[in-house]
Every structure is written in structure tokens, then in C-alpha cells.
Amino acid sequence: MSIALRSLLAGAAMMAAMPAFAADIMVEDAYARSASPAAKSGAAFMQIVNHGEDDRLIGAASPAAEKVELHTHVETGDGVMQMKHVEEGFEIPMHGTLSLERGGNHVMLMGLTAPLEQGDSIPVTLTFEKAGEMTVDVMVDLERAPGEGAGHDMEHSHGTDKDGAKKAE
């Protein structure tokens, strides 16, 4: 890899790693991933830090997907975890942090308009009840292992049984 290309990639990674701001809201360590290049869905994860009054993340949008929703994982009672759309959004308490992470709350990207490729970046517009809209450039990181980064990531899966085996959909 040439020095110029390395410098360009390093600069892009630094820009993507920089926090984004809207009012008293700051977004850190944003990244997106999909299970494979052929996947029709993906997810975005990040840390949302609130330096102001109580607020709520109430929506998200991106040209990278036909449909974008706020999701969480819930246990169905038989040891199976399922994703659920959270219509009311996620509370972000005053001076608190909302962790959107693998295996927990996240931004779901459904009907990807193009494959998520390592090193690319996609715009994601977050809508807050009080702070309004904020567009974040989210770096695609298909290589990040669970637990890496600012959040406390857990393995993200879309339907696994209690032993972690992939459930037929």
C-alpha cells in the first residue's frame, strides 16, 4: 500500500473517529457493520453523550438503507433473543450516555442500498426530541471484535438460541 493511500485512509479514519455535536449532544465511536457483503441489513453502533438536559433519541435515517429503525434485543422467555423496534426511542438522561452496542440497543439498517464495505463511511441522521437532527459520518468496520471501542460491545445477532447458535429465520 502506498504512503499516499495510507495517509488518506488514516486521515479518513481520524475524521470518522472525531465526535459529532448537536446542541449538548455528542456522538463518539460510531461504526457500522453487516454480517457479510451480501447481507441486506446492517447496524450502526455508537456512544451518545448528553451534556445538557434530558433528551430522547427518537429516530434515525440514512441513504445507505431503505428503512432505518431504532432496535433493541429482548428475551422471549424461552432463551431466544429477538430484535424489537423501539418506537418511543431511547432516553438519554441529563449528563448521561446512551450506548448503542452489539447485542443491545442499536440503529438497524434494513434494505441496504449497497454493501457495507470495510473503511467506507455512511451518513446517519439521528433525530433527538429536544436537540433536533444531527448527521454523523459512520465508519464501516467489519473487523471490529465485540468489546473493542468505547462501548461495552456484546456479540450482535439477529435470532440466536440460548446457546448462541443461529436460529433459522
Image (spheres, rainbow, N blue to C red):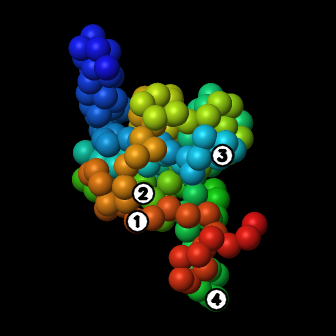
Q: Do labels 4 and 3 touch, CB within 8 Å? A: no
Q: Do labels 4 and 2 touch, CB within 8 Å? A: no
Residue depicted at 52% across the width and 33% down the height: 117
Q: Nearer the viewer, residue 143 or 160?
A: 143
Is residue 15 placed above or below 75 in the rendered structure? above
- The quarter in which the N terminus is drawn is top left
Say whether disc 4 or disc 2 marks the residue closer to the N-terminus.
Answer: 4
Q: Residue furthest bottom?
A: 78
Say whether disc 1 or disc 2 marks the residue closer to the N-terminus.
Answer: 2
Tell me the mark number nearer the camera, choosing from 4 and 3: 3
Q: Separation of disc 3 and disc 1 at Cα?
A: 20 Å
Q: Amino acid at mark 1?
A: Met
Left or right of 145, for residue 38: right
Q: Amino acid at mark 3?
A: Ala
- The residue indicated by pointer 4 is 78
Q: Position of residue 164 (x, y in %)?
A: 54, 76
Q: Separation of disc 1 and disc 4 at Cα?
A: 20 Å
Say whether disc 3 or disc 1 marks the residue closer to the N-terminus.
Answer: 3
Q: Do labels 2 and 3 touch, CB within 8 Å? A: no
Say whether disc 4 or disc 3 marks the residue closer to the N-terminus.
Answer: 3
Q: Position of residue 72 (x, y in %)?
A: 55, 63
Q: Amino acid at mark 2?
A: Glu
Q: Separation of disc 1 and disc 2 at Cα?
A: 7 Å
| Mark 4 surroundings: few (<14), some (14-19) or many (≥20) residues within 10 A | few
Q: Do labels 1 and 2 touch, CB within 8 Å? A: yes
Q: Position of residue 84 (x, y in %)?
A: 64, 64
- The residue indicated by pointer 3 is 39
